[in-house]
């Protein structure tokens, strides 16, 4: 089964996962004497008995747990352990039950909360402080007090408590809060493109698994037909040997091909069994004995150039590169905003004791102020941070060019292979028909003594080769269409599952994005804080190879005649 080769830039775009190092285990003690002759300890005997009981007991099945938005029909099909033979149901199961898709959907939900986290910076922040303290002071007499006869130190001590509440609200941060919100929005948009890439990759895997299982099952039938034909040839040649029409060498040659056909059948059956397992892996259910033929996928483009243009606007890899660049661009805006002052409103209410030694006399204090703060001199720290952020953003901008270049190369490879497989499938089908006719004629000629046994075996091998090649080409053409659509961003649920329910990632996002906004205050401060920031336009492609267009492959049907 063939799987897509995603652009290498995707590895740079997706967030890496750190794998903890496995601790080095201590060396096991050496065994003394033969293991079989060692006496069985009581613990070992108990463990063996438990293992036998576990094997005898029925396997425990955990209840399937799918997200609540899973359609009822999909939930029933996924949990009923029923075989799947319908094309649309297979793709729907991959779309709604793929662990990779479900994990990415959950991750997108976690990034949904980053938007209200960033917008919370526009609102009020109220903190409190409660204090219960003990204080002791010892004051020695001054020189004047000593002259007046006071030589004993004065000691004061006691308990007191206080309560304070502090209210803060940013009025104008010169883009600090707005850039933080832009960064959060770009991170969420980036994860959405990763979700699109994961969904389309799952669709491609499902298509490849479905078509691959049909191919490998047909491969088993082809191998069996080949074995049947060779076995009949062996039986006929055994009769002809008794009639002294052929030699023992001819018979041994046929036996060689029969044994080889058995081995080829074993390999075909192993490949089919592996494809059955891949079907479960990619679709989430076992395959029915009869699979419906896959319908043509709706390719939205007709030429390779159209595929390039479509990918620039829809490819999740390219769009993810743009969103990553927006994240680092927001970091540049935040670094530049840190050079500017900020204006905050602060209010403080204090209820405390007048004396630090008792609570008999108390006082209230309320303070409200507008505070303007900003850096004066930090030895170039903030300007260095700006340069750092600008360089990082330039790197991400270049990665857009790399994503576009890698995607174009992958599209061209898949497109050319699709054209070749389509053209080859027709030729192979014609060749299979001609080879079968030639083989049938060769059997007649063999009985008439016009050709040898070796010639018949070569014709049988030719039938096997062209039928296998035709089967492979048909499956590859289906997978190539899915691969092209996934690379350009067209293998969407609406395209492959028209009219079926779709997962709406904006539903949760719209629910939480304004959860903690303060009416009037948050929109007003947000609009004011966005004024100093430049617009977040899509960055253009700076790759000089962008203008280089390599046409699709052309195939030659007729060779020029030499004079």
Image: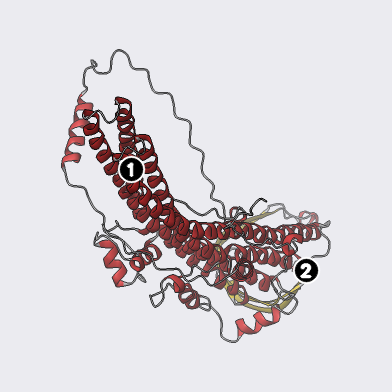
Q: Residue at x 63, y 61 (%)?
A: 552
Q: Residue at x 22, y 22 (%)?
A: 41
Front position in the image: 344 or 312: 312
Q: Residue most toward the bottom?
A: 520
Q: Can residue 67 be spotted in the picture? A: no
User: What residue does disc 2 label?
Assistant: 374
Residue 477 position (above or below residue 183) = above
Residue 12 position (above or below residue 451) = below
Q: Which mark is residue 445?
A: 1
The spot of residue 267 in percent (x, y) is 35, 40
Q: Which mark is residue 558?
A: none
Question: Could you say whether the residue bearing mark 1 is in a helix, strand or loop?
Answer: helix
The spot of residue 537 in percent (x, y) is 70, 74
Front position in the image: 25 or 132: 25
Q: Earlier in the sequence, mark 2 or mark 1?
A: 2
Q: CA distance from mark 2 to mark 1?
A: 99 Å
Front position in the image: 309 or 555: 555
Q: Residue at x 57, y 60 (%)?
A: 415
């Amino acid at each position: 089964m063939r799987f897509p080769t995603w652009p290498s830039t995707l590895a740079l775009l997706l967030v890496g996962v750190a794998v903890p190092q496995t601790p080095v285990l201590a060396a096991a003690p050496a065994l003394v004497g033969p293991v079989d002759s060692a006496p069985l300890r009581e613990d070992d005997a108990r463990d063996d008995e438990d293992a036998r009981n576990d094997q005898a007991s029925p396997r425990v099945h955990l209840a399937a747990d799918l997200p609540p938005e899973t359609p009822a029909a999909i939930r029933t099909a996924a949990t009923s352990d029923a075989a799947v033979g319908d094309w649309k149901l297979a793709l729907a199961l991959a779309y709604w039950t793929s662990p990779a898709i479900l994990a990415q959907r959950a991750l997108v939900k976690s990034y949904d909360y980053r938007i209200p986290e960033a917008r919370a910076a526009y609102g009020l922040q109220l903190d409190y402080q409660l204090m219960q303290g003990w204080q002791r002071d010892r004051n020695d007499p001054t020189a004047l007090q000593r002259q007046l006869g006071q030589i004993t130190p004065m000691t004061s001590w006691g308990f007191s408590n206080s309560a304070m509440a502090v209210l803060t609200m940013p009025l104008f941060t010169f883009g600090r809060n707005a850039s933080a919100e832009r960064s959060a929005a770009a991170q969420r948009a980036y994860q959405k493109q990763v979700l699109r890439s994961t969904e389309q990759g799952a669709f491609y895997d499902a298509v490849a698994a479905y078509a691959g299982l049909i191919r490998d099952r047909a491969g088993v039938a082809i191998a069996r037909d080949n074995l049947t034909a060779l076995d009949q040839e062996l039986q006929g040649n055994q009769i002809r040997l008794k009639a002294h029409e052929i030699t023992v060498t001819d018979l041994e040659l046929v036996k060689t091909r029969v044994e080889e056909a058995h081995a080829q059948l074993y390999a075909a059956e192993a490949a089919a069994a592996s494809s059955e397992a891949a079907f479960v892996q990619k679709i989430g259910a076992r395959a029915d004995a009869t699979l419906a033929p896959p319908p043509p996928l709706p390719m939205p483009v007709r030429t390779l150039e159209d595929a390039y243009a479509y990918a620039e606007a829809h490819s999740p890899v390219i769009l993810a590169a743009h969103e990553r660049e927006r994240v680092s661009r927001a970091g540049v805006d935040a670094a530049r905003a840190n050079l500017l002052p900020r204006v905050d409103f602060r209010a403080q209410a204090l209820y405390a004791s007048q004396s630090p030694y008792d609570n008999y006399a108390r006082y209230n204090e309320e303070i409200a102020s507008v505070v303007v703060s900003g850096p004066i001199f930090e030895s170039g720290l903030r300007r260095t941070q700006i340069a750092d952020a600008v360089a990082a953003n330039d790197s991400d901008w270049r990665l857009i060019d790399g994503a576009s270049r890698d995607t174009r190369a992958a599209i061209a490879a898949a497109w050319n292979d699709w054209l070749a497989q389509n053209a080859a499938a027709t030729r192979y089908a014609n060749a299979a028909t001609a080879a079968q006719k030639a083989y049938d004629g060769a059997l007649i000629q063999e009985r008439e003594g016009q050709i040898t046994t070796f010639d018949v075996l070569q014709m049988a091998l030719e039938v096997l080769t062209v039928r296998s090649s035709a089967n492979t080409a048909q499956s590859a053409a289906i997978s190539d269409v899915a691969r092209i659509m996934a690379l350009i961003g067209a293998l969407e649920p609406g395209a492959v599952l028209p009219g079926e329910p779709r997962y709406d990632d904006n539903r949760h996002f719209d629910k939480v994005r304004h959860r903690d906004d303060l009416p009037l205050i948050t929109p007003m401060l947000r609009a004011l804080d966005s004024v100093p920031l430049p617009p977040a336009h899509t960055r253009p492609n700076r790759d000089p190879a962008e203008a280089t267009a390599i046409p699709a492959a052309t195939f030659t049907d007729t060779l020029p005649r030499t004079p």
